Image (tube, coloured by chain):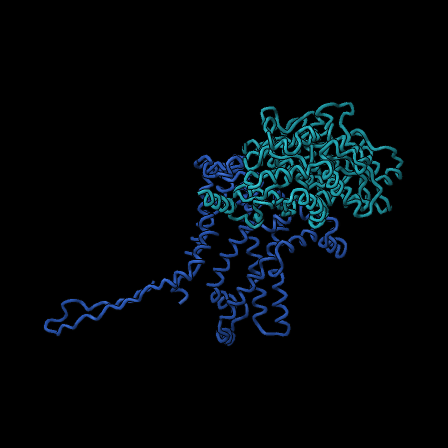
Chain colours: A cyan, B blue
């Protein structure tokens, strides 16, 4: 009876939206048996095809070592979540797959993924090999993680070194106040036509995830948090409002962000804006591949400015622990092979190879000894990942939180682009998001 | 299935009439081949429409989330909780659902009006013969032929505030506006969704109405012209009544499509559209597939299904012509 029930489950999920099916991807991969594994990889490079080339080289080494073939599918981020949902509900998924690390707790609760404990944990070399902040994103606190880190990322401040030199600014700002002052100096009319054509900061005002990340970081720096110790949402606490206000004020009050940025839906538009010389600074995780592809070299990275430079603990947070994790599907017929593939992709050698190719951060401390990761930028980002990064709330409704908070801030940027935004506006928007979150819990 | 059975004459006939033997009852045998022919269609209809719909209704009564999605048969039964949450105007979820429902109704009426007016104008224009008629027919069908996603992405580029073609024309070239407005943010997002949806759908209305016009005999117009009826009167008193059956079906089908519009707002704005463009289908998607609250998403879908079904039945009974009307 198991198979018919699974088929019914799939049909049920497909029928859920009734009107929303057009955007729901369909699952095509399925766990394989014998000497073949299926692997769903997320899109890390500039194109799906680039990713395929990079990964096929690594997987060829795996096949050589173990004799196991791997069927690879690189899935764009826009489709990955729905593909996983379909796989979870139907039980027909790949053996091994990548997930966004902020999805880990939600996916853990489905029970569809193998817990990394006992022999499974041993198969990937144990927890101590990994950077602990990245490891902590593998699932809910106090439970065996159902995902292990694969690629690490962290936010830092990127700035245009030529623009800084032209403005006589010698060092990147260390505090938020200095950051705003620096941005104001760099917001200028360069051709004297009365219109600003170089802005201090670029940001993706319509990006739900970027806004949610900033609400998390800026809220922590202001002494707040998105949830209290009982798991109740506290989006509209005074500290959170203060943190979000810092972010929105860049456009609404400080006027150092072009109003057109309110329309940017993705980080790539922000990076392009920076590379085109329209802005002097931006916050991002791994823009180097885009900047390098454009031949843009006049940039450097710096720590994310802190509200209080003497802050420690949560108030010294510069980034959430960003990255991509790896999970093994419970329904795999080849658990041993799947764990071997997980061990291969997180081995010292492959971590160097993969993270170098994707300009991300290794999730193993040992991998940083390689000369590929000795640059100032990588050392800086490693330090932030290890010492100044906190995981996004490890709760099952993390995705809903990002949607609600990120959308509230997106709407505030839309308002800022065409008018004014007061502190009351920010509080009201966050209170609305808070009440929706509370109602859904 | 048709069964031809010749009734025997009434027993007892006229007294004294010679009793004829009852003719043999001829029965046409039911052919299993007919069932075999329609079986694939029935099975596919069941699999694609009926079963998912029934399961969707069932799920609306469950507390289905990521905790039990793998074995949803064990999801707790929550009765009408999901429906109450979806319909409570004072609750954050119900308030948003009802606001979105009202917005979608307005959206449907506005788009339908634009689509129909454009469709009938083009159909009337191209109903007559003139040089270039064939080219225009093909040209008008382009929006319908383009992949919806590709076309919507192109529109999103065109409506960009800083670099979009629309603002370049309105502000830089024609000087109609002094400042570049934001089309994809705030209240304008609603009108962008209207424009893109209408642009994609009007060729269908044009095609259907053109086909309906071609069924009207030309001599009716000739007679009306001889009697001195103006073109406008001909349109009102001949064209509209004579295309009424096709027009009625067209309006019903298109209003259902427009009401369920998902692709355009999703591609233009992503999973979190601006408030003004938050239509009902993206909202259901958000609850079901972003928040993993499948029970709530299912309940909203069922509410929508019921409302659209009732509206459709009323429309069919009141507006669509009955068989005798057509005769």
Left or right of A316: which side holds B117?
left
Q: Tell me the quadrant of the picture where the N terminus of chain B can be found.
A: bottom left
Tell me where residue A389 appears, x and y as whole percent: 71, 30
Camera-side residue of A166 and A88? A88
Quarter of the image for residue B321 reads bottom left
Camera-side residue of B82 and A132? A132
Q: What's the residue at 59%, 28% (across, down)?
A: A143
Q: Does residue A21 lie above or below A306 as drawn?
A: below
Q: Tell me the quadrant of the picture where the C terminus of chain B can be found.
A: bottom left
Tell me where residue A299 appears, x and y as whole percent: 83, 40
Q: What's the residue at 51%, 40% (across, down)?
A: B294
Quarter of the image for residue A353 reads top right
Left or right of A45: which side holds A278?
right
Camera-side residue of B297 and B316? B297
Residue B213 visible at all? yes
Tell me where residue A91 appears, x and y as whole percent: 53, 42
Q: Does residue A439 lie above or below B36 as drawn?
A: above
Residue A195 visible at all? no
Tell me where residue B140 appears, x and y as whole percent: 62, 64
Q: How many marks?
A: 0
């Amino acid at each position: 009876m198991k198979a018919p029930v699974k088929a019914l489950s799939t049909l049920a999920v497909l029928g859920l939206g009734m009107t929303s099916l057009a955007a729901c991807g369909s699952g095509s991969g399925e766990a394989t048996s014998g000497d073949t594994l299926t692997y769903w990889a997320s899109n890390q490079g500039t194109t799906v095809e680039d990713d395929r080339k990079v990964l096929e080289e690594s997987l060829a080494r795996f096949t050589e070592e173990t004799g196991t073939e791997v069927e690879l599918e690189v899935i764009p981020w826009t489709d990955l979540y729905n593909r996983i949902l379909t796989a979870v509900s139907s039980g027909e998924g790949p053996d091994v797959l990548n997930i966004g690390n902020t999805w880990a707790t939600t996916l853990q609760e489905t029970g569809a993924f193998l817990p990394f404990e006992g022999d499974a944990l041993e198969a990937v070399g144990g927890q101590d090999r990994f950077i602990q902040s990245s490891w902590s994103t593998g699932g809910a606190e106090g439970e065996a993680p159902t995902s292990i880190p694969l690629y690490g990322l962290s936010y830092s401040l990127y700035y245009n070194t030529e623009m800084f030199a032209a403005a006589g600014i010698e060092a990147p700002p260390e505090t938020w106040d200095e950051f705003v002052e620096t941005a104001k100096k760099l917001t200028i009319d360069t051709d004297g036509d009365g219109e600003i054509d170089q802005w201090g900061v670029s940001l993706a005002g319509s990006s739900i995830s970027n806004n949610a990340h900033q609400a998390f970081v800026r809220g922590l720096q202001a002494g707040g948090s998105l949830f209290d110790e009982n798991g109740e949402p506290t989006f509209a606490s005074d500290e959170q409002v203060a943190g979000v206000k810092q972010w929105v004020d860049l456009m609404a009050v400080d006027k150092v962000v072009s109003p057109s940025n309110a329309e940017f839906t993705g980080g790539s538009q922000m990076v392009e804006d920076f590379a085109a010389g329209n802005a002097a600074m931006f916050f991002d995780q791994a823009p180097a591949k885009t900047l390098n592809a454009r031949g843009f070299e006049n940039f450097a990275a710096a720590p994310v400015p802190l509200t209080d430079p003497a802050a420690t603990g949560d108030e010294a947070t510069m980034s959430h622990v960003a990255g991509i994790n790896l999970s093994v599907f419970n329904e795999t017929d080849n658990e041993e092979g799947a764990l071997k593939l997980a061990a291969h992709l997180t081995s010292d050698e492959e971590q160097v190879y993969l993270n170098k190719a994707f300009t991300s951060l290794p999730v193993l401390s040992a991998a940083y000894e390689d000369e590929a990761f000795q640059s100032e930028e990588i050392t800086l980002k490693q330090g932030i990942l290890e010492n100044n990064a906190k995981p996004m709330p490890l709760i099952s409704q993390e995705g809903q939180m990002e949607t609600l908070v990120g959308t509230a801030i997106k709407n505030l940027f839309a308002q800022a682009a065409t008018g004014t935004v007061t502190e009351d506006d920010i509080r009201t928007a966050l209170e609305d998001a808070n009440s929706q979150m509370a109602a859904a819990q | 299935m048709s069964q031809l059975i010749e009734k025997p004459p009434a027993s007892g006939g006229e007294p004294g009439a010679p009793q004829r033997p009852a003719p043999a009852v001829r029965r046409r045998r039911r052919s299993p081949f007919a069932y075999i022919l329609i079986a694939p269609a029935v099975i596919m209809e069941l699999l694609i429409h009926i079963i998912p719909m029934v399961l969707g209704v069932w799920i609306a009564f469950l507390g289905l989330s990521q905790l039990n999605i793998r074995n949803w048969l064990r999801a707790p039964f929550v009765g009408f909780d999901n429906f109450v949450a979806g319909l409570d105007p004072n609750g954050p979820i119900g308030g948003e659902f009802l606001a979105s429902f009202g917005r979608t109704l307005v959206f449907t009426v506005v788009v339908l009006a634009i689509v129909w007016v454009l469709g009938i104008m083009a159909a009337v224009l191209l109903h007559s013969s003139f040089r270039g008629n064939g080219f225009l027919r093909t040209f008008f069908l382009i929006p319908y032929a383009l992949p919806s996603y590709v076309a919507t992405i192109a529109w999103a580029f065109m409506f960009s505030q800083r670099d979009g073609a629309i603002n370049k024309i309105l502000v830089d070239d024609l000087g109609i506006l002094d400042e570049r407005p934001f089309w994809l943010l705030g209240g304008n997002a609603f009108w962008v969704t209207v424009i893109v949806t209408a642009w994609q759908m009007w060729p269908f209305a044009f095609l259907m109405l053109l086909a309906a016009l071609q069924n009207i005999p030309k001599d009716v117009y000739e007679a009306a012209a001889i009697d001195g009826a103006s073109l406008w009167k001909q349109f009102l008193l001949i064209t509209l009544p004579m295309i009424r059956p096709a027009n009625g079906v067209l309006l019903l089908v298109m209003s259902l499509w427009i009401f369920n519009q998902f692709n355009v707002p999703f591609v233009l704005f992503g999973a979190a559209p601006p408030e003004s463009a938050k239509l009902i289908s993206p909202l259901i998607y958000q609850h079901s597939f972003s928040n993993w609250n499948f029970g709530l998403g299912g309940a909203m879908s069922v509410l929508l299904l019921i409302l659209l079904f009732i509206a459709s039945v009323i429309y069919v009974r009141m507006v669509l012509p009955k068989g005798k009307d057509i005769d």
